[in-house]
Image (cartoon, grey):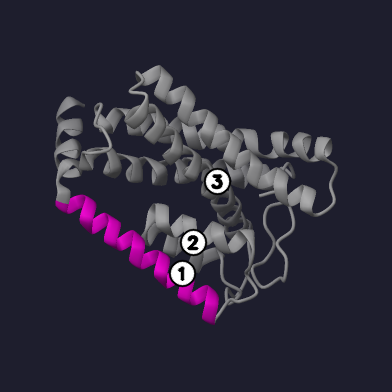
Amino acid sequence: MDDLQTSINTFLSDPATLWIWATLNVVSTLVVWIDLARFNPQTHGLMRWVWLLTALYSGPIGLAVYYYSGRRQIARDSLWRRSFRSVAHCYSGCGAGEIIGLLLAVGVLALGNLGVSLMTFTFAYVLGFGLTVGPLMADGVPFRTAVRDSFVAETASITVMEVTAIGIDLWLSAGAGPSEPLFWTSMIFSLSAGFFAAYPVNVWLIHAGVKSGMGHPGEAHHHGHG
Protein backbone atom coordinates (compact mmCIF):
# COMPACT_ATOMS: atom_id res chain seq x y z
CA MET A 1 0.00 0.00 0.00
CA ASP A 2 2.86 2.39 0.81
CA ASP A 3 4.47 1.69 -2.56
CA LEU A 4 1.16 2.38 -4.31
CA GLN A 5 0.72 5.67 -2.48
CA THR A 6 4.30 6.68 -3.26
CA SER A 7 3.84 5.95 -6.97
CA ILE A 8 0.55 7.86 -7.12
CA ASN A 9 1.98 10.81 -5.17
CA THR A 10 5.00 10.98 -7.48
CA PHE A 11 2.71 11.15 -10.51
CA LEU A 12 0.38 13.69 -8.92
CA SER A 13 3.26 15.85 -7.68
CA ASP A 14 4.58 16.41 -11.19
CA PRO A 15 3.68 19.96 -12.34
CA ALA A 16 3.10 18.58 -15.84
CA THR A 17 0.32 16.38 -14.45
CA LEU A 18 -1.43 19.42 -13.01
CA TRP A 19 -1.08 21.46 -16.22
CA ILE A 20 -2.37 18.64 -18.42
CA TRP A 21 -5.24 17.91 -16.06
CA ALA A 22 -6.17 21.59 -15.75
CA THR A 23 -6.08 22.02 -19.53
CA LEU A 24 -8.36 19.02 -20.07
CA ASN A 25 -10.78 20.38 -17.48
CA VAL A 26 -10.91 23.83 -19.04
CA VAL A 27 -11.34 22.45 -22.55
CA SER A 28 -14.11 20.09 -21.36
CA THR A 29 -15.89 23.00 -19.69
CA LEU A 30 -15.69 25.05 -22.90
CA VAL A 31 -17.13 22.16 -24.93
CA VAL A 32 -20.06 21.89 -22.51
CA TRP A 33 -20.61 25.66 -22.61
CA ILE A 34 -20.66 25.68 -26.43
CA ASP A 35 -23.00 22.70 -26.60
CA LEU A 36 -25.38 24.26 -24.09
CA ALA A 37 -25.43 27.52 -26.02
CA ARG A 38 -25.78 26.06 -29.51
CA PHE A 39 -27.65 22.78 -29.15
CA ASN A 40 -29.28 22.76 -25.69
CA PRO A 41 -30.46 26.30 -24.95
CA GLN A 42 -33.45 24.87 -23.08
CA THR A 43 -31.05 23.97 -20.27
CA HIS A 44 -30.83 27.15 -18.26
CA GLY A 45 -30.52 28.45 -14.74
CA LEU A 46 -29.15 26.04 -12.15
CA MET A 47 -28.74 23.01 -14.42
CA ARG A 48 -26.56 25.00 -16.80
CA TRP A 49 -24.21 25.71 -13.90
CA VAL A 50 -24.44 22.10 -12.75
CA TRP A 51 -23.03 20.83 -16.04
CA LEU A 52 -20.39 23.54 -16.34
CA LEU A 53 -19.13 22.86 -12.82
CA THR A 54 -19.22 19.10 -13.32
CA ALA A 55 -16.97 19.48 -16.37
CA LEU A 56 -14.74 21.98 -14.56
CA TYR A 57 -14.23 19.61 -11.62
CA SER A 58 -13.85 16.35 -13.57
CA GLY A 59 -12.82 17.32 -17.09
CA PRO A 60 -13.40 14.59 -19.70
CA ILE A 61 -15.29 12.52 -17.12
CA GLY A 62 -17.75 15.35 -16.52
CA LEU A 63 -18.00 15.94 -20.27
CA ALA A 64 -18.83 12.26 -20.86
CA VAL A 65 -21.49 12.32 -18.13
CA TYR A 66 -23.03 15.43 -19.69
CA TYR A 67 -23.19 13.84 -23.16
CA TYR A 68 -24.61 10.63 -21.72
CA SER A 69 -27.33 12.16 -19.56
CA GLY A 70 -27.54 15.94 -19.83
CA ARG A 71 -28.50 16.68 -23.45
CA ARG A 72 -31.99 16.77 -24.97
CA GLN A 73 -30.60 14.70 -27.85
CA ILE A 74 -30.37 11.51 -25.77
CA ALA A 75 -32.56 8.92 -27.49
CA ARG A 76 -34.05 7.34 -24.38
CA ASP A 77 -34.02 8.40 -20.76
CA SER A 78 -33.42 5.85 -18.02
CA LEU A 79 -32.83 5.40 -14.30
CA TRP A 80 -29.09 5.39 -15.00
CA ARG A 81 -29.18 8.70 -16.84
CA ARG A 82 -31.53 10.24 -14.28
CA SER A 83 -29.15 9.17 -11.52
CA PHE A 84 -26.20 10.80 -13.26
CA ARG A 85 -28.15 14.06 -13.48
CA SER A 86 -29.04 13.73 -9.81
CA VAL A 87 -25.49 13.12 -8.63
CA ALA A 88 -24.18 15.92 -10.88
CA HIS A 89 -26.65 18.30 -9.24
CA CYS A 90 -25.33 17.29 -5.82
CA TYR A 91 -21.73 17.35 -7.05
CA SER A 92 -21.83 20.92 -8.30
CA GLY A 93 -22.53 22.33 -4.85
CA CYS A 94 -20.51 19.85 -2.83
CA GLY A 95 -17.48 20.29 -5.08
CA ALA A 96 -17.49 24.04 -4.56
CA GLY A 97 -17.87 23.54 -0.82
CA GLU A 98 -15.02 21.05 -0.74
CA ILE A 99 -12.68 23.38 -2.61
CA ILE A 100 -13.52 26.32 -0.34
CA GLY A 101 -13.22 24.18 2.79
CA LEU A 102 -9.85 22.74 1.81
CA LEU A 103 -8.41 26.13 0.87
CA LEU A 104 -9.49 27.61 4.20
CA ALA A 105 -8.61 24.62 6.37
CA VAL A 106 -5.23 23.87 4.76
CA GLY A 107 -4.11 27.08 3.11
CA VAL A 108 -5.32 29.63 5.68
CA LEU A 109 -5.85 27.91 9.03
CA ALA A 110 -3.32 25.06 8.65
CA LEU A 111 -5.59 22.64 10.49
CA GLY A 112 -4.85 18.99 11.18
CA ASN A 113 -6.64 16.14 9.44
CA LEU A 114 -9.65 16.20 11.78
CA GLY A 115 -10.11 19.94 11.39
CA VAL A 116 -9.70 19.71 7.62
CA SER A 117 -12.26 16.91 7.43
CA LEU A 118 -14.85 18.69 9.57
CA MET A 119 -14.51 22.07 7.85
CA THR A 120 -14.49 20.61 4.36
CA PHE A 121 -17.49 18.38 5.05
CA THR A 122 -19.41 21.30 6.56
CA PHE A 123 -18.86 23.58 3.58
CA ALA A 124 -19.65 20.79 1.12
CA TYR A 125 -22.84 19.81 2.94
CA VAL A 126 -24.10 23.38 3.31
CA LEU A 127 -23.59 24.24 -0.37
CA GLY A 128 -24.89 20.90 -1.63
CA PHE A 129 -27.89 21.15 0.67
CA GLY A 130 -28.53 24.75 -0.37
CA LEU A 131 -28.67 23.83 -4.05
CA THR A 132 -31.66 21.63 -3.26
CA VAL A 133 -33.45 23.89 -0.77
CA GLY A 134 -33.17 26.99 -2.97
CA PRO A 135 -34.86 25.59 -6.10
CA LEU A 136 -37.61 23.99 -4.02
CA MET A 137 -38.41 27.33 -2.38
CA ALA A 138 -38.28 29.01 -5.79
CA ASP A 139 -40.99 26.54 -6.87
CA GLY A 140 -43.16 27.68 -3.95
CA VAL A 141 -42.35 24.98 -1.40
CA PRO A 142 -42.42 26.37 2.18
CA PHE A 143 -39.02 26.71 3.86
CA ARG A 144 -39.56 24.05 6.53
CA THR A 145 -40.86 21.55 4.00
CA ALA A 146 -37.97 22.30 1.63
CA VAL A 147 -35.44 21.76 4.42
CA ARG A 148 -37.07 18.50 5.53
CA ASP A 149 -37.35 17.11 2.01
CA SER A 150 -33.78 18.13 1.16
CA PHE A 151 -32.42 16.52 4.32
CA VAL A 152 -34.10 13.22 3.49
CA ALA A 153 -33.17 13.31 -0.20
CA GLU A 154 -29.60 14.57 -0.06
CA THR A 155 -27.94 13.56 3.20
CA ALA A 156 -26.96 10.03 2.16
CA SER A 157 -25.61 11.16 -1.21
CA ILE A 158 -23.62 14.07 0.22
CA THR A 159 -22.24 11.97 3.07
CA VAL A 160 -20.97 9.17 0.82
CA MET A 161 -19.58 11.67 -1.68
CA GLU A 162 -17.70 13.70 0.90
CA VAL A 163 -16.45 10.88 3.11
CA THR A 164 -14.94 9.31 -0.01
CA ALA A 165 -13.56 12.53 -1.46
CA ILE A 166 -12.13 13.90 1.77
CA GLY A 167 -10.64 10.55 2.78
CA ILE A 168 -8.91 10.06 -0.57
CA ASP A 169 -7.73 13.66 -0.67
CA LEU A 170 -6.13 13.43 2.78
CA TRP A 171 -4.54 10.11 1.83
CA LEU A 172 -3.06 11.40 -1.43
CA SER A 173 -2.16 14.97 -0.56
CA ALA A 174 0.16 13.96 2.32
CA GLY A 175 -0.11 17.42 3.89
CA ALA A 176 0.64 19.37 0.69
CA GLY A 177 -0.32 23.05 0.66
CA PRO A 178 -1.95 25.20 -2.06
CA SER A 179 1.46 26.20 -3.44
CA GLU A 180 2.22 22.58 -4.38
CA PRO A 181 0.83 20.74 -7.43
CA LEU A 182 -0.02 17.72 -5.25
CA PHE A 183 -2.60 19.78 -3.33
CA TRP A 184 -4.56 20.49 -6.51
CA THR A 185 -4.13 17.18 -8.31
CA SER A 186 -5.16 15.18 -5.25
CA MET A 187 -8.20 17.44 -4.89
CA ILE A 188 -9.20 16.93 -8.53
CA PHE A 189 -8.76 13.17 -8.27
CA SER A 190 -10.71 12.95 -5.00
CA LEU A 191 -13.60 15.04 -6.34
CA SER A 192 -14.18 12.59 -9.19
CA ALA A 193 -13.83 9.64 -6.81
CA GLY A 194 -16.55 11.11 -4.61
CA PHE A 195 -18.77 11.62 -7.65
CA PHE A 196 -18.63 7.94 -8.60
CA ALA A 197 -18.99 6.77 -5.00
CA ALA A 198 -22.26 8.71 -4.70
CA TYR A 199 -23.66 7.48 -8.02
CA PRO A 200 -25.00 4.08 -6.80
CA VAL A 201 -26.50 5.86 -3.78
CA ASN A 202 -28.48 8.10 -6.12
CA VAL A 203 -29.55 5.11 -8.22
CA TRP A 204 -30.97 3.48 -5.10
CA LEU A 205 -32.60 6.67 -3.77
CA ILE A 206 -34.38 7.31 -7.08
CA HIS A 207 -35.34 3.66 -7.51
CA ALA A 208 -36.75 3.61 -3.96
CA GLY A 209 -38.69 6.83 -4.54
CA VAL A 210 -36.78 8.83 -1.94
CA LYS A 211 -35.64 11.22 -4.68
CA SER A 212 -37.47 12.00 -7.88
CA GLY A 213 -34.28 13.00 -9.66
CA MET A 214 -33.89 15.62 -12.36
CA GLY A 215 -36.27 15.61 -15.32
CA HIS A 216 -35.41 14.86 -18.94
CA PRO A 217 -32.99 17.49 -20.29
CA GLY A 218 -35.38 18.23 -23.14
CA GLU A 219 -37.90 19.63 -20.68
CA ALA A 220 -38.08 23.36 -20.19
CA HIS A 221 -37.70 22.96 -16.41
CA HIS A 222 -35.99 20.27 -14.38
CA HIS A 223 -38.34 19.35 -11.58
CA GLY A 224 -37.64 17.12 -8.64
CA HIS A 225 -35.10 16.86 -5.89
CA GLY A 226 -31.59 16.68 -7.25
Query: Which mark is first along the chain, 1 or 2?
Result: 1
* Residue at point 57%, 46% (across, down): 90
In the figure, is residue 99 to the left or right of 38?
A: left
- The segment highlighted magenta reads 16-38
Residue ID for mark 2: 52
Which SS type dominates the magenta stretch? helix
Give, as a three-letter code, the residue at label 2: Leu
Magenta residue check for 29? yes
189 versus 38 height, above or below: above
| Cα–Cα gap, marks 2 and 3 | 12 Å
Mark 2: few/some/many CA within 10 Å (<14, 14-19, 20+): many
Give, as a three-letter code, the residue at label 1: Val
* Residue at point 52%, 61% (across, down): 51
Give, as a three-letter code, the residue at label 3: Gly
- Helix or strand or loop: what does disc 2 sit on? helix
Q: Nearer the viewer, residue 149 or 19?
A: 19
Labelled pair 2, 1 in contact (Cβ < 8 Å): yes
Horizontal and vertical percent position of residue 93? 55, 46
| Cα–Cα gap, marks 3 and 1 | 18 Å
* Residue at point 67%, 57% (across, down): 214
* Residue at point 38%, 65% (across, down): 28
Horizontal and vertical percent position of residue 17? 19, 51
Residue ID for mark 1: 32
Mark 3: few/some/many CA within 10 Å (<14, 14-19, 20+): many
In the figure, is residue 106 to the left or right of 95?
A: left
193 versus 222 height, above or below: above
Query: Which mark is first along the chain, 3 or 2?
Result: 2
Residue ID for mark 3: 93
- Helix or strand or loop: what does disc 1 sit on? helix
